Image (spheres, rainbow, N blue to C red):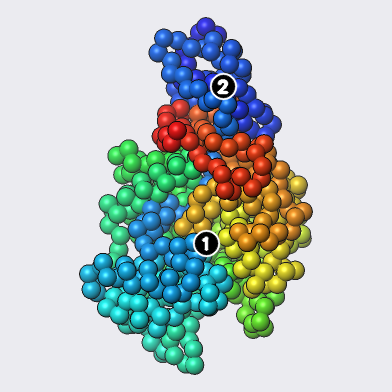
């Protein structure tokens, strides 16, 4: 027996894509949770012993487990219990209000009704719902309906009353309270949402753990074995760290998680983490502390991303600048100097400019050529900004599902000149910026197939092509979803490729993602089998 080792598991008769540089192999052997060897069926079956399990892939395509490099795992799991307000579930305002009304009927009077996922551009009315819409649908319940992006919510009158919000309420810094003809219309954007969230019941530890487990199992069903939780602390503060540790100890952490610590002034959990010794890199390959996140702007579709030029039809609106320059520069420097990797939210070119400048200042004062600071989303970056990112080793961390879900909204709010070339992943790939991808779930579904389809076609869900020169090859798209996701977490040595010594995190699909017709990626692909550390954790065969 080669190596003198008996494999624990062997996969045979497959098209196993090991990585962009490594290509395809027929078979793979696993030992102690890691890849032992890859090669032909004959070679790998030479590692078979009496107790070796053998899985026949029957010609199917397999890849490294996918890495969703920006989502909100706890929020995803919890939101799975909220009203589904996505366009697919509620294409019209009437449909949406009917769903709210149905949930209210099944909810004790006075208890909260939550919904998430609407996009006003896709509603038949072309506008946000209002407090009056929600009042009619659920007159006896406080309601908070959150836009898909998470940066805009609509509250009904009961919710506004509980939060003490009136027309005279001061608008929080970095927030918007919507008024129509001088009267509250229910819209709360960015930091103004916190006024309502502050009076909602806090999630219990058990609810947080349930969210982790439910969300993680949902990811495994798509072949996603690793993720970044993009704002730990956003739901329940430092208690989320405890929930993650408890989930891991109880065997209820289904996927590998890279924890991003919420670092916004006033709600930061970084000081608590710092005192507990939780620095970037602390932990193990199942649960590791990642970077620190600060929000610098909002969302493009919600017209709150900070742009240098106004939104279409709103000459006075360039979005929301969440924090003054000096606050951002000081915070980034502080976290950088403590040794944290930074993973800040910046979508508009104004916010990206502020963030790159902050990173450059921090790196100039305390050089670290391999810190790998990231720009989360990075939707509307400019050529000049790309060159500065390359020089400073700054990585774009986009969610290419946004092209599929929101591309037409970007054109509607920004026009074709700015909308079409958004999220320029082809440019980033050509510049060697190692772009990853993610879903930002629950903003978008973690379903990877719209994401992959958007990377190789640049098509929106309606079929609009968003700047064809920014497409990726199939191999590049998979590399973004695997190897580069690992790279931006400083984990490229342990996951992201199927090579000896790396974790045997594997996804098996019923469609060949390299060879199948492009349209079938989106409409005809399922994950049949998911392995984490060589153990089957999802089986839909």
Q: Is residue 55 left or right of residue 166?
A: right
Q: Is residue 274 above or below residue 164?
A: above
Q: Is residue 380 left or right of residue 103?
A: right
Which residue is rendered at x = 76% and y = 47% of the image?
Answer: 430
| Disc 2 crowd, CA 10 A, few/some/many (<14, 14-19, 20+) | some
**Residue appearing at x 60%, y 45% in the figure:** 521
- Residue 427, how many percent across, how many down? 74, 52
Q: Residue furthest left?
A: 108
Q: Is residue 307 visible?
A: no
Q: Nearer the viewer, residue 284 or 111?
A: 111
Q: Report the front residue among 155 and 430.
A: 155
Residue 110: percent from the left, percent from the top?
24, 74
Give coordinates of residue 126: x percent, y percent.
55, 76
**Quadrant showing the C terminus:** top left
Q: Which residue is mark 2?
A: 13
Give the SS element for disc 1.
Answer: loop
Secondary structure beneath dot 2 equals loop
What residue lies at 52% left-to-right and 6% top-to-bottom?
Answer: 1
Residue at 40%, 49% in the rendered image = 215
- Few, some or many residues within 10 Å of mark 1 (<14, 14–19, 20+): many
Q: Earlier in the sequence, mark 1 or mark 2?
A: 2
Proximity of marks 1 and 2: CB atoms separated by less than 8 Å: no
Task: Using the image, tell me which numbered label, if any, was put on residue 294.
Answer: 1
Label tally: 2
Checking the image for residue 325, the label placed there is: none
For marks 1 and 2, give the one nearer the viewer: 2
In space, the residues marked 1 and 2 are separated at their CA atoms by: 47 Å
Query: Is residue 294 or residue 438 the one in the foreground?
Result: 438
Looking at the image, can residue 45 be seen?
yes
Question: In the rendered image of this protein, does residue 86 appear above or below residue 471?
Answer: below
The x, y position of residue 387, in whole percent, is 76, 55
Left/right placement of residue 245 relative to residue 517 reads left
């Amino acid at each position: 027996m080669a190596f003198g080792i008996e494999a624990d598991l062997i996969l045979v008769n497959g098209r196993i894509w090991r990585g962009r540089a490594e290509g395809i192999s027929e078979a793979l052997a696993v030992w102690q949770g890691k890849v032992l060897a890859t090669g032909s069926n004959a070679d790998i079956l030479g590692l078979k012993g009496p107790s070796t399990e053998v899985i026949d892939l029957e010609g199917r395509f397999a890849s490294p487990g996918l890495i969703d490099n920006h989502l909100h795992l706890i929020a995803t799991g919890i939101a799975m219990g909220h009203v589904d307000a996505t366009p697919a579930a509620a294409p019209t305002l009437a449909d949406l209000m009917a769903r709210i009304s149905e949930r209210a009927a099944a909810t004790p009077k006075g208890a909260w009704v939550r919904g998430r996922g609407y996009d006003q551009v896709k509603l038949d009315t072309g506008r946000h719902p209002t407090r009056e819409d929600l009042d009619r649908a659920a007159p006896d319940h406080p309601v908070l309906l959150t836009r898909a992006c998470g940066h805009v919510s609509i509250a009904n009158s009961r919710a506004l009353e509980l939060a003490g919000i009136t027309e005279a309420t001061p608008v929080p810094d970095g927030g918007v309270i919507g008024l129509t003809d001088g009267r509250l219309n229910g819209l709360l954007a960015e930091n103004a949402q916190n006024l309502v969230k502050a009076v909602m019941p806090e999630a219990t530890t058990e609810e947080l753990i349930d969210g982790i487990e439910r969300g993680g199992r949902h990811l495994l069903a798509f072949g996603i074995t690793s993720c970044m939780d993009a704002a730990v602390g956003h739901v329940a503060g430092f208690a989320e760290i405890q929930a993650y540790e408890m989930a891991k100890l109880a065997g209820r952490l289904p996927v590998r998680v890279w924890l991003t610590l919420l670092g916004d002034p006033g709600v930061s959990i970084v000081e608590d983490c710092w005192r507990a010794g939780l620095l970037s890199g602390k932990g193990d390959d199942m649960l590791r502390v990642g970077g620190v996140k600060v929000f610098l702007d909002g969302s493009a579709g919600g017209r709150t991303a900070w742009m240098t030029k106004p939104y279409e039809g709103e000459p006075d609106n360039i979005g929301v600048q969440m924090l003054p320059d000096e606050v951002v520069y000081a915070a980034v420097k502080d976290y950088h100097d403590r040794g944290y990797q930074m993973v800040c939210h910046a979508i508009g070119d104004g916010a990206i400019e502020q963030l790159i400048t902050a990173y450059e200042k921090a790196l100039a004062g305390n050089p670290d050529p391999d810190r790998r600071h990231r720009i989360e989303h990075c939707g509307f970056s400019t050529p000049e900004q790309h060159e500065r990112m390359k020089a400073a080793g700054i990585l774009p961390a986009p969610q290419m599902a946004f092209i599929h879900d929101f591309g037409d909204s970007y054109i509607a709010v920004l026009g074709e000149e700015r909308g079409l070339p958004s999220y320029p992943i082809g440019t980033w790939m050509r510049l060697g910026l190692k772009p990853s991808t993610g879903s930002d779930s629950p903003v978008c579904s973690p379903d990877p197939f719209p994401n992959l389809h958007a990377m190789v076609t640049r098509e929106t869900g309606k079929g609009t092509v968003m700047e064809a020169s920014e497409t990726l090859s199939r191999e590049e798209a998979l590399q973004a979803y695997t190897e580069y996701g690992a790279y931006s977490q400083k984990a490229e040595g342990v996951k992201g490729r199927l090579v000896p010594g790396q974790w045997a995190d594997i996804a098996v699909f019923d469609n060949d993602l390299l060879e199948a017709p492009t349209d079938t990626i989106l409409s005809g692909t399922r994950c049949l089998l998911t392995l984490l550390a060589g153990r089957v954790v999802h089986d839909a065969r």
